[in-house]
Amino acid sequence: MKTLVLGASGQLGKCLKAVASNRNIDTLDFPDESVANILDVEKLKALFAEKNQHT
């Protein structure tokens, strides 16, 4: 199972991404803001639908 991390381009998201990379953690998914903008409900629905197909 993967965990979707929203806000990956922010300060905390960048830190989580670096830690995940350094520790070879591949269960975190850091989508780009262009596809995971929390203000765009339709894009979020599409993202969740896409991610649920891969499980």
Image (cartoon, rainbow, N blue to C red):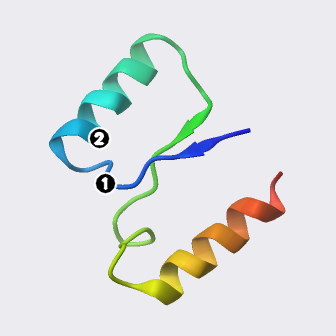
Q: Amino acid at mark 2?
A: Gly
Left of 6 or right of it: where is 7?
Answer: left
- Which residue is pictured at 39% across the width and 59% down the height? 32
Q: For this rendering, which residue is in front, 31 or 12? A: 12
Mark 2 nearby-residue class (10 Å; few <14, some 14–19, many ≥20): some
The type of residue carrying mark 1 is Gly
- Tell me: 17 left or right of 52: left
Please tell me which residue is depicted at 59% across the width and 70% down the height of the picture: 47
Cα separation, mark 2 vs mark 1, equals: 6 Å
Residue at screen point 46% across, 55% down = 31
Q: Are marks 2 and 1 in contact (CB under 8 Å)?
A: yes
Q: Earlier in the sequence, mark 2 or mark 1?
A: 1
Which residue lies under the disc numbered 2?
13
Furthest residue toward left: 11
Measured as percent of width and height from the top left, residue 9 is found at: 25, 50
SS of the residue under disc 1 = loop
In the image shown, does 25 or 39 lie closer to the viewer?
A: 39
How far across and down, in percent of the image, does residue 39 sit?
A: 32, 81
Quadrant in the rendering for residue 46: bottom right
Horizontal side of 22 relative to 12 (left or right) equals right
Q: Position of residue 52 (x, y in %)?
A: 76, 62
* Residue on which disc 1 sits: 7
What is the residue that sits farthest to the bottom in this orientation? 42
Which residue lies at the image location 25% right of the left edge and 29% below the top edge?
Answer: 15
Where does the N terminus fall, quadrant-wise?
A: top right
Up/down of 17 relative to 7, above or below? above
Neighbourhood count class around disc 1 (C-alpha, 10 Å): few under 14, some 14–19, many 20 upward: some
Residue 54 picture quarter? bottom right
Where residue 49 sits: x, y (%)?
Answer: 71, 73
The disc label shown at residue 22, or none: none
Find numbered disc 2 in the image and state the secondary structure of the residue it sits on: helix
